[in-house]
Image (cartoon, rainbow, N blue to C red):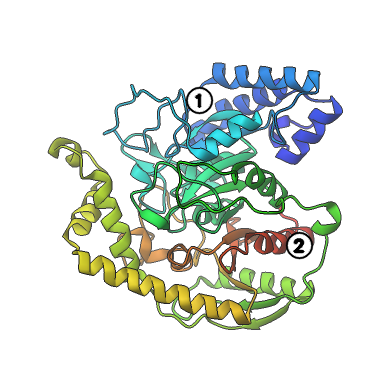
Amino acid sequence: MTDPADLSAAELIDEYRAGTLSPVEAARAVLARIERDDPKVNAFCLVDADTTLEMARASADRWRRGATLGALDGVPVSIKDVLLTRGWPTLRGSTTIDPSGPWTEDAPSVARLREQGAVFAGKTTTPEFAWKGVTDSPLTGVTRNPADPSRTAGGSSGGAAAAVASGMAPLALGTDGGGSVRIPASFTGTFTIKPTYGRIPHYPASPFGTLAHVGPITRTVEDAELLLDAVCGPDARDWSALAPPSDPFLLSPGERAADLTGLRVAFSPALGFATVDPEVAALVAAAAETFAELGAKVEEADPGFGDPVEEFEVLWFAGAAKVVEHLTAEQFAALDPNLREGCERGARYSALDYLTATARRMELGRLMGLFHERYDLLLTPTMPIPAFGAGVDAPAGSPSSHWTGWTPFTYPFNMTQQPAASVPCGTTAAGLPVGLQVVGARHADALVMRACSAFEVARPWS
């Protein structure tokens, strides 16, 4: 018999519907998997088996009575430890936050899942204040990659991705301010999408401003569709949230197998400025060919902008300085050393520096808007490299000690607020996963998901 921890969310729902599996059995399987495997990867910072099983028992009772609350009733989901969760502390990877709370409020996405009857498997690790592209912190230590525990799972949603890749929860909620769901998805061989900004309501507002998105990490595109349908509902606490989509993300079987005939797709191997590992480049080029085989008209084309890293760092490190402005000198000294340096740098920026970076951001948005008049989708590598060693902020040879030195494909699309997915597209000779990034115009989330679904059918990875 298949271990329930190895089933996707969609498969679990089918089992519940058929009466061949109970949400309690699924929860117990997930908790057993966490107990067995989490010591190797350190994906979870909070596991509360009593609460998880209580939620599962309530779901099982609803299934027995035919009174389920939503499509995800009884499905285990992990929550990144930057998203408020009623009854559980949200410590954001930092020793500077008092765990005593009170913790009385759910973030919008967490509230929607609770309303749907989802079962919370626990909270997943994040670097301190979700500030970087790998996952280690003074509070929780180093999170590792299930594909090779000597390597990083990426970040800042590294715990979320490691949990999904290990079968410790089929669904995970993460956040992405510069690549934080896409980096770990690429490194761990999982699927994710950073939706258009505002598609998933977010509260409290991120100190990193409108760079920060909430997004799912899952094993399959179908599971991400289910999760998106659950969490895109309105929430009055987020004044910048978009109206709910008019149609569900979940595709029918016929839609899932559809080809991509008529789509205009640009393939940019390096965005015009990045250096890419040869194995990664070859796997991503082969993935782009698959889009052509599915009927899309694929052309090699760059969007036409230079690396916006300097402007992004102004926005990012100014946000980091805002995060820690309330800390005492003693608390500030206890921060991740590289975070301290970044915050000191961010505090030195002027309002003019920030507005100049914002102007560059607006220009990037204009360029990408015009680009998507010619192309429906843009394909790039998600990451220019496979996962590197765990416990460091940057690989050997990186042009910067900060995470922005090795993530050239992700942060530009936080600046433009576009939907950007990472789809597994193969593994290196060493068995390390590689991701293909699929970028759409703002608000074209459904198109990005449909293209990823067609790719998954053609090149199944799960």
Residue 145 in the image, given as x and y percentages of width and height: 51, 46
Q: Mark on residue 47?
A: 1
The count of marks equals: 2
Q: Secondary structure at mark 2?
A: helix
**Front-lying residue, 218 or 248:** 248
Image point 71% across, 50% down: which residue? 248
Q: Which residue is mark 2?
A: 454
- Inspect the image, locate mark 2, and give the three-letter code of the amino acid beneath it: Ala
Q: Secondary structure at mark 1?
A: loop
| Residue 449 in the figure: left or right of residue 313 | right
> For residue 128, which quarter of the picture?
top left
**Could you tell me how far apart the alpha carbons at marks 1 and 2 are, in whole angstroms?**
36 Å
- Inspect the image, locate mark 1, and give the three-letter code of the amino acid beneath it: Val
* Res 338 visible: no
Vertical arrangement, residue 128 with respect to residue 346, above or below: above
| Residue 99 in the figure: left or right of residue 39 | left
Of label 1 and label 2, which has the lower sequence position?
Answer: 1
